[in-house]
Image (spheres, coloured by chain):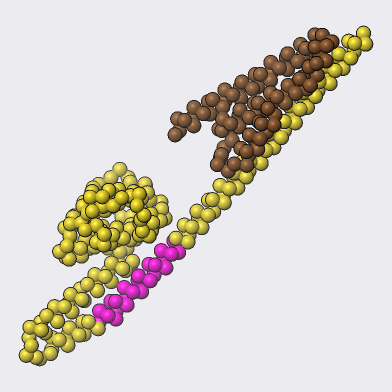
Amino acid sequence: MIIFSCLGLIDLFRNDEHKTLLTNPLFWICTGVLFFNAGEFTYLFFFDTFLQNHWDKTAKVFASINNKLIFVLYSCISIAILCTKRSKKKT
Amino acid sequence: MHKAIEEENLTTMILLGSIIVVAFVGFVVLLAYLFTTRKNKLIQEKQLMKTQFEQELLQTQLEIQEQTLKTISEEIHDNVGQVLSLAKLNLNTFESNSEQKLQDTKVLISKAINDLRDLSRSMHGDRIAELGLQQSLADELQILENSGEFRTRMTITGEPYKLPPQKEMVLFRIAQEALNNVIKYSKAKNITVTLNYANGNFSLAVTDDGTGFDLHSKTGIGLKSMQNRAALIGGQFNLQSAPGSGTSITIELPNP
């Protein structure tokens, strides 16, 4: 997911057609997905260790991080939907 | 106890790792965003400069064209016109038996002098500035009317006012080009020129009832030239035509 969102962002940055990135839905979706998966990366990396040791405290910390990242992801998706509606209105 | 410390350490490490990864991603995205914004700004500036350059080029072309027309006009008036006038004078004093031929030649030369005078007037930019757009267009329509081929009409709406000389000159040249197109291609019988001064905006329309043409077909340099001229004075060029429905050309000038 990280690689795909990075490729999406690179394509956006290279493309000259998009004058303002902040109004481009794809930019927000790629950014949200990238942040979410980058944040989850370390958590998933040590996922097996948690399961084996039953570390509750660590799990709680990660649940908190996960919640915040979900908030970031869905905020980005919401902005993307708003941008799509706006661009549809303009056309 | 050892396991608790290990858990604590790992939690801190992973927490820090997550923060660092997210911060790094954020930094990279921000950097790329700033870079792209700057790049887009530079592209826009480049396009603006290109447009300005094209406008200046167009302006220079028009000035050169005006100067050429002025020179030709002066040459017609001062040289060819004078020679013909002299020939007419000579014919008046010529004594011959073939009176009818002499009379015909006089008529022909008179017509040539008048035509040249009209041509000279329509080419001379200073004269357009002196007479104003309205009168210059009326003269142009009168020439067409005199040819007997067309019926012309000029409509003025709103309270007329004088536009800047440069704009009047460009508008006149556009109208002239439109009228030339009517003569050459339209097979029209009626030509209407409308000047609209109402509501603080100005618009000029040249309409004919000729054959018209398909807007999607290939158009000539004349139309492109009219579009460019209109753009030069900040006007909007509109063309309406369809086969069998005549043609209408409108130039709208907001806040002239």
* Vertical arrangement, residue B20 with respect to residue B44, above or below: above
| Left-right relation of B198 to B147 | right
Chain letter, brown: A
Q: Quadrant of the N terminus of chain B?
A: top right
- Spot occupied by residue B254 in the image (x, y as percentages of width and height): 36, 46
| Main SS of residues in magenta | helix
What is the quadrant of residue B14 in the picture?
top right
- Spot occupied by residue B183 in the image (x, y as percentages of width and height): 24, 61
Q: Residue at x 20, y 65 (%)?
A: B143
- Spot occupied by residue A44 in the image (x, y as percentages of width and height): 76, 20
Give the residues drawn in magenta, as a range.
B59-82
Of the pair B79 and B109, the residue shown nearer to us: B109
User: In this rendering, does residue B99 appear at all?
Assistant: yes
Chain letter, yellow: B
What is the quadrant of residue B12 in the picture?
top right
Q: Residue at x 66, y 31 (%)?
A: A4
- Spot occupied by residue A9 in the image (x, y as percentages of width and height): 64, 35
